[in-house]
Amino acid sequence: MADQSPSQIAPRSFALPRIKGRVVVMTLYLLFLLLPIYWLLNMSLKTNTEILNTFTLWPRNLTFANYATILTDPSWYMGYVNSMIYVVMNTAISVAVALPAAYAFSRYSFMGDKHLFFWLLTNRMAPPAVFALPFFQLYSSIGLFDTHIAVALAHCLFNVPLAVWILEGFMRGVPKEIDETAYIDGYSFGRFFIKIFIPLIASGVGVAAFFCFMFSWVELLLSRTLTSVDAKPIAATMTRTVGASGIDWGVLAAAGVLTILPGALVIYFVRNYIAKGFALGRV
């Protein structure tokens, strides 16, 4: 084969990778969402002097004193303990009450069922400020003020309707023939409900528990109104950080970082259940 002259050799073209517009938009959106969290973490590792006097993208003098203050001061770490106690209690009560209620709405038709279901959801629509004073007077008169169960029961007013709405959608996806087959095989209702039905809607229970946990964890008004000392949550503690020397921004930022961690852990463990909930169209 004859050698080709340089003029006959076609130059190679190197195509640059094309960046899709959706990738750029998603990247900017994620950066926008993560920026406050990064800034909170950045502030938690600084001293108050650096926070107030200079603008830095990362700590110049790295310090963990703010976290040490929270983990060693009972007025701080007991706020997390109190919050976890009433949040776990509320999640357990809400899911336990919502399971039979959702089963009734999904399996039976009775007079006023649609109106009752809508009324449950209206409790979730109402702002907590509407119920703050009635709960305060009620709990003060019966001796439940400043207790964990008081906050847990108050949050049930909002979380039980939400859990019923989520679980009812999952239960409608289970065929009624499974119930009839279990009764023919001799299962009692309690045995069938616990051993057969609940495992079939395990993803729905996980989704309902997640939302009950998150709504109870971030709620401030009722938890602050119904507690004072013994059951004061971390959200109320964070709003009372003004002292004679001003606001301790570093400790407040460290408390914010530690407040995010429980929610992040819950999301990690129930992420698959949440994905199934979105797939079923009920979340």
Image: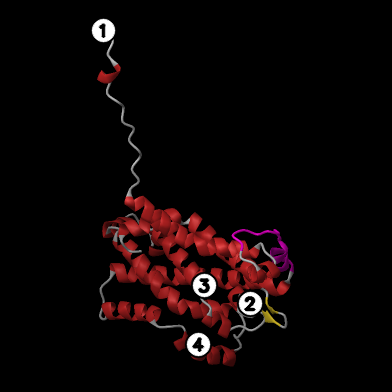
Q: Nearer the viewer, mark 1 or mark 3?
A: 1
- Three-letter residue code for mark 1: Ala
Q: Secondary structure at mark 2?
A: helix
Front residue of this view, candidates 130 and 238 = 238
Residue 22 falls left or right of residue 40: left
Residue drawn at x 32%, y 56% is: 279
For residue 237, the mark is 2
What residue does disc 4 label? 132
Q: Position of residue 280 (x, y in %)?
A: 31, 58
The residues tagged by marks 4 and 3 sit, at their Cα atoms, a distance apart of 16 Å
What residue does disc 1 label? 2
Is tag 1's residue or tag 2's residue first in the polypeptide sequence?
1
Tag 3: Cα neighbours inside 10 Å, few (<14), some, or many (≥20)?
some
Q: Which residues are magenta?
A: 56-72
The answer to which image quadrant residue 139 occupies is: bottom right
- Three-letter residue code for mark 4: Ala
Residue 249 showing in the rendered view: yes
Tag 2: Cα neighbours inside 10 Å, few (<14), some, or many (≥20)?
some
Q: Is residue 148 above or below residue 261?
A: below
